[in-house]
Image (spheres, rainbow, N blue to C red):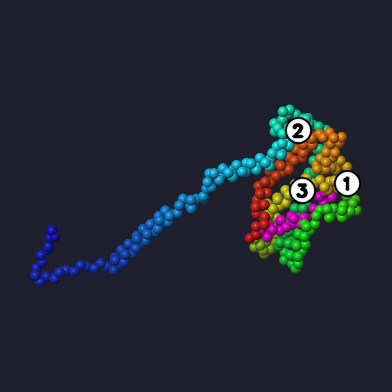
């Protein structure tokens, strides 16, 4: 039951006093802010709840896919490394067991390595090859980088036509220019020396010029323009800014040319006459001729020499592996 309050007759009923205007506005603003915060919290919870975990984290491949990819990589790794493993194993076998196709030799011997160093000046051949490789790789990298910088940075009439002409030289087979090149070196009196094996790289290579030019085009031009505003000349921009930024591409060029010079047999057969100037490929050809005379092929000597000459290239690749992979991944990307 509600209790009713009796009032005297004729007394006016008191009206409720209205709240001040400022107090009412403050209460409404606080209520609006409170409702807004609650609404934002609800929306954030809904948004967070609507996103599945795989959208907020990097999706992982199924287990079967990862196992299949790993197994495939292992198979390809074994296929590519098996020839070298077989070569190393055969170098520790006597001649009668070289082709028994067993990776663990039944008769382990070091006599093959001793015989190689006694029968051939292998140390001299390695030194000649190392000298030619270093000079060829360094000269072609520097000269190709300079030409590529000119084609990528400077604007001049006929630039694209001239660059197309440089690329057109790659279409010429090596057999076409072999005789004219030999006549030039013979006229200079350089046959029988190591100069024809590396000095031609002083003029650059069309393939490396294209490779480095693509890397230069991927660099922001604003860096070079800012350096020019600061007073740097063209040579300073090239040596102090451009070359350090393109280190991966330079490493790729060095490794490519080092591998090509280390395994070059054709020019060694054309220009080298004396065994004192032989490189490793030319020396291996001499070993084949020497130990294959009369039908008695001493394959244990040949495979041992091949192992000795292959190991430096493997070491060189592992030294520059990171820069090599980075250069291959970034070369050709523009912008």
Position of the C terminus by quadrant? bottom right
State the mark number for residue 260.
3
- The residue located at (78%, 31%) in the rendering is 95
CA separation, marks 3 and 2?
A: 29 Å
- The residue located at (67%, 63%) in the rendering is 225
* Crowd around label 2: few <14 · some 14–19 · many ≥20 (10 Å): many
Is 34 above or below relative to 325? below
First along the sequence among labels 1 and 3: 1
Q: In the orientation shown, which residue stands out farthest toward the left?
A: 9
* Crowd around label 3: few <14 · some 14–19 · many ≥20 (10 Å): some
Position of the N terminus by quadrant? bottom left
Q: Is residue 146 visible?
A: no
First along the sequence among labels 3 and 2: 2
CA separation, marks 1 and 2?
A: 36 Å
| Residue 96 picture quarter | top right
Q: Picture coordinates of residue 104 (x, y %)?
A: 69, 31
The tally of labels here is 3
The residue under label 2 is 98
Q: Is residue 179 magenta?
A: no
Report the magenta residues as a range: 194-219
State the mark number for residue 29.
none
In the displayed structure image, the side of residue 2 where residue 179 appears, left or right: right
CA separation, marks 1 and 3?
A: 20 Å
**Quick one: SS at disc 2?**
loop
* Crowd around label 1: few <14 · some 14–19 · many ≥20 (10 Å): some
Q: In the orientation shown, which residue stands out farthest toward the top?
A: 107
Is 37 above or below relative to 114? below
The residue under label 1 is 192
> Along the line of sight, which residue is nearer the eye, 27 or 193?
193
- The residue located at (48%, 53%) in the rendering is 55
| Residue 44 picture quarter | bottom left
């Amino acid at each position: 039951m509600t209790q009713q309050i009796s009032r005297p007759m004729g007394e006016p009923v008191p009206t409720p006093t209205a709240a001040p205007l400022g107090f009412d506005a403050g209460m409404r603003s606080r209520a609006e802010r409170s409702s807004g915060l609650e609404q934002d919290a609800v929306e954030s919870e809904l948004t967070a709840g609507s996103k599945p975990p795989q959208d907020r984290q990097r999706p992982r491949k199924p287990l079967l896919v990862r196992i299949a990819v790993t197994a495939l990589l292992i198979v390809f790794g074994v296929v590519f490394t098996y020839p070298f493993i077989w070569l190393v194993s055969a170098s520790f076998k006597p001649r009668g067991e070289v082709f028994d196709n067993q990776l663990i030799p039944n008769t382990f011997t070091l006599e093959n390595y001793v015989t190689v160093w006694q029968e051939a000046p292998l140390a001299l051949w390695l030194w000649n090859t190392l000298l030619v490789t270093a000079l060829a790789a360094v000269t072609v990298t520097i000269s190709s980088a300079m030409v590529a910088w000119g084609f990528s940075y400077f604007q001049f009439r006929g630039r694209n036509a001239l660059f197309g002409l440089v690329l057109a030289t790659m279409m010429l087979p090596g057999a076409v220019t072999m005789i004219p090149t030999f006549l030039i070196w013979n006229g200079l009196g350089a046959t029988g020396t190591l100069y024809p094996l590396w000095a031609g790289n002083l003029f650059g290579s069309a393939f490396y010029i294209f490779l480095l030019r693509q890397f230069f085009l991927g660099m922001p031009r604003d860096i070079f323009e800012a350096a020019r505003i600061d007073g740097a000349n063209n040579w300073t921009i090239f040596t102090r800014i451009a070359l350090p930024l393109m280190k991966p591409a330079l490493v790729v060029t060095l490794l490519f040319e080092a591998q090509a010079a280390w395994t070059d047999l054709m020019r060694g057969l054309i220009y080298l006459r004396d065994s004192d100037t032989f490189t490793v490929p030319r020396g291996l050809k001499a070993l084949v001729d020497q130990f294959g005379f009369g039908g008695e092929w001493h394959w244990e000597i040949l495979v041992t020499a091949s192992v000795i000459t292959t190991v430096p290239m493997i070491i060189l690749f592992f030294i520059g592996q990171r820069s090599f992979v980075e250069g291959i991944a970034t070369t050709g990307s523009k912008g």
